Image (cartoon, rainbow, N blue to C red):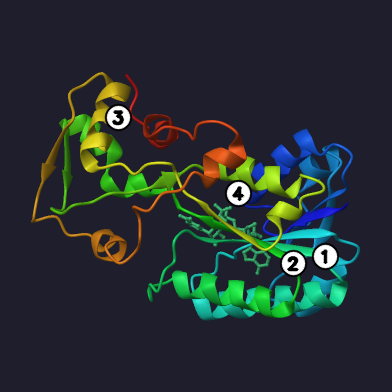
Amino acid sequence: MSIAITGASGKLGKLILKYLRQQATNEPLIACVRKPEGTTDYEELGVEVRYCDYDVPGSLAPAFTGVDKLLLISGSDIDDTVRLRQHTQVVEASKRAGVKHLSYTGFAFPGTVQVPPVPLHLATEQAIITSGIPYTFFRNALYADLTSQFGLDSAIRTGELATFPGEWRFNTVTREDLAKAISSVLGSRPAPHHVNRIYELTAPRFWTFQNLAEALSEISGKNVVHREDPQIQSWIYGYLSKLNTTSTTEDLETLIGGPATSLKESILPLIEWKK
Ligand SMILES: NC(=O)c1ccc[n+]([C@@H]2O[C@H](COP(=O)([O-])OP(=O)(O)OC[C@H]3O[C@@H](n4cnc5c(N)ncnc54)[C@H](OP(=O)(O)O)[C@@H]3O)[C@@H](O)[C@H]2O)c1
């Protein structure tokens, strides 16, 4: 049962392959990358490396030949029109290559939101369903990196987390947790219960800016208070207000088989401030 992953040179892809290597020791693993040079670490792990560029349609079907399970990790182009074309080409090539199961990393609780990247992810899911290939969709919540937008180090330095007023609630996840969850599905065999399933990979509960200030206080040992400031101007608030950042499920913890990383733990790697 061979398992291939696109975007395998990226942060999420690397982690998924790491966890797959740990559990599916006998399954052939294939890293599909657009720059095969510089991937010696994969070869050392016994992971086959294949050339695959979403923008080079001719590279795709050969990369997927003989693959049983393919995970398409959404691309990173800033233009969603480009990304949709890339993803559609991957779906078409998967069909041509005879891929038996196609998984995709989308966005959690898309609803009917019309702001990028939600329409892209829904359109890609539709293309996969239309292809007739059995699928699993991993709809990932916002990465914990998002919290950097609110000035974590500055809040520790000043003792104040200043944010735009509002009933803000966020649900964020670490790539580590996502990788554990996704690899548990990809590596499981046989797995009929994962076929044509959608997992909303969110944290089990949302957090508020008050919670974020408390986490910063615990990390720094300093008192960090939360204050609302209507003078704050940042694109991030307008953007986030259009997304569903609060709905939660147990899917992530169920697939991991344990608790998701706490807010405090998930922001630790993002903080440069040292005690
Ligand atoms: N949930 C969220 O909050 C959130 C936030 C940001 C992004 N995302 C999505 O999640 C995905 C994975 O996250 P990540 O942190 O692993 O991102 P990342 O580190 O930027 O990795 C992106 C991967 O996509 C590959 N890629 C880009 N264009 C490609 C192309 N034309 N052909 C083949 N591969 C291509 C990159 O290859 P190279 O190494 O060759 O560039 C890289 O392996 C992102 O790509 C994005 O779609 C989600």
Specify few, some or many for label 3: CA neighbours under 10 Å numbering under 14, 14-19, or 20 or more: some
On the image, the x and y values in percent for residue 82 come to 57, 79
Q: CA distance from mark 1 to mark 2?
A: 7 Å
Q: Decide: is 215 above or below 232.
A: above
The residue at 79%/58% (across/down) is 69
Q: Amino acid at mark 4?
A: Leu
The residue at 38%/48% (across/down) is 171
Q: Amino acid at mark 3?
A: Ala
Would you say 263 lies left or right of 152 here? right
Q: CA distance from mark 3 to mark 1?
A: 44 Å
Specify few, some or many for label 1: CA neighbours under 10 Å numbering under 14, 14-19, or 20 or more: some
Residue 215 is labelled as: 3
Residue annotated with mark 2: 134
Q: Secondary structure at mark 1?
A: loop
State the residue lying farthest toward the front. Answer: 193
Q: Of callouts 3 and 2, which one flags the residue occurring earlier in the amino acid sequence? A: 2
Disc 4 residue lies near ligand 1 with CB under 8 A? yes
